[in-house]
Image: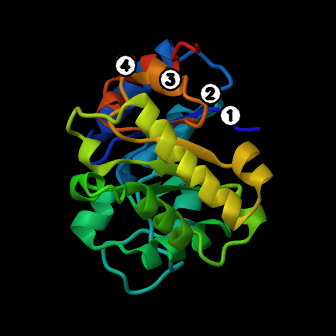
Amino acid sequence: MRYPFIAGNWKMYKTIAEAKAFAETFKKNYQPSDVRVAICAPYLQLPVLVEAFRGTGIGVGAQNVHYEAEGAFTGEISIPMLEEIGVDYCIVGHSERRQYFNESDDTVNRKVKALLKTSIIPIVCVGEDLQQKEAGYEKQLVSEQVKNALHDIPADKAERIVIAYEPVWAIGTGKTATADDANATIKVIRDTMANLYCRNCADNKVRIQYGGSMNTKNVDELMAMPEIDGGLIGGASLKAQDFARVVNFEEK
């Protein structure tokens, strides 16, 4: 069964003290339901959030990880380090990682494979920039990104993956794809999964989020779309009350 899953991505925001304050406020406004919830935070805040959310059902995720378990990789964090903390999820291939840190489809694939050997669930990001969208290339691009990210990954592993469709032109801009457009592109991603694996896996197992400026004003409309299973939330996840409103969206 595809259950809704909404994850906040704090990017490079919030100190440890701010993370603690957010957690306490969010717990007061959070209404437990069948919606899975997580916060993906900077590394230093992860232990604080794991402890703050213990026993609440609210998950904690990292924003990046190295595919090697250890080694001479200055500045990197390994999967065993995240496991030791108690992390539940890890974002892989976010557009900002691809743009600013030259993360490739091959690197994303290696990270996904490494994460799938553990209990940590990968949130794999795909999406087009404005130039690709205007050229009408977005659907072909996201399909290829999915294929590359999941290369040589068997079906029983792939069904654990969360995919986040994030139109790059909508991230942090306040712009968003229309609900119908987002739904149509996510349908392409789901059909790609069906072709790679099976229809049942795509339709009933794999969760696909929308990650292009979902917020308090558009969450209800976006979450009413049949293909959209949740959101990867940036700006609207930084204020506890706003994120609670997104998580507690009104079902139509």
Instruction: Point out which mark residue 216 bears.
Output: 4
Report the Cα–Cα distance between label 4 and label 3: 9 Å
For label 1, the residue is: 3
The residue type indicated by label 4 comes to: Thr
* Residue hosting label 2: 35
Three-letter amino acid code of the residue under disc 3: Val
The residue that mark 3 highlights is 247
Q: Position of residue 144 (x, y in %)?
A: 48, 68
User: Considering only order in the chain, which callout, 1 or 4, is on the residue closer to the N terminus?
Assistant: 1
Q: Callout 2 environment at 10 Å: few (<14), some (14 to 19), or many (20+)?
A: some
In the image: residue 55, left or right of residue 125: right
Q: Upstream in the sequence, badge 2 or badge 4? A: 2
Is 196 rendered above or below residue 96?
Answer: below
Q: Which residue does the image show at 54% across and 54% down from the upper left?
A: 85
Mark 3, secondary structure of its residue:
helix
- Residue closer to the observer: 81 or 217: 217
From the viewer's perspective, tell me whether residue 141 is left or right of residue 224.
Answer: left
Q: Earlier in the sequence, mark 4 or mark 3?
A: 4
- Secondary structure found at label 1: loop
Is residue 57 rendered to the left or right of residue 155?
Answer: left
Report, in whole angstroms, how far the alpha carbon at label 2 lies from the one at label 4.
16 Å
Contact? badges 2 and 1 (CB < 8 Å): yes
Looking at the image, the residue that sits furthest to the front is 136
Q: Residues within 10 Å of mark 4 (few under 14, many from 20)?
A: some
Label 4: element kind: loop
Q: Which mark is residue 26?
A: none
Please give the name of the residue rendered at 42% of the width and 37% of the height, measured from the top-left corner: 181
| Identity, as a three-letter code, of the amino acid under mark 1 | Tyr
Marks 3,2: beta carbons within 8 A? yes
Sequence-first disc among 3 and 2: 2
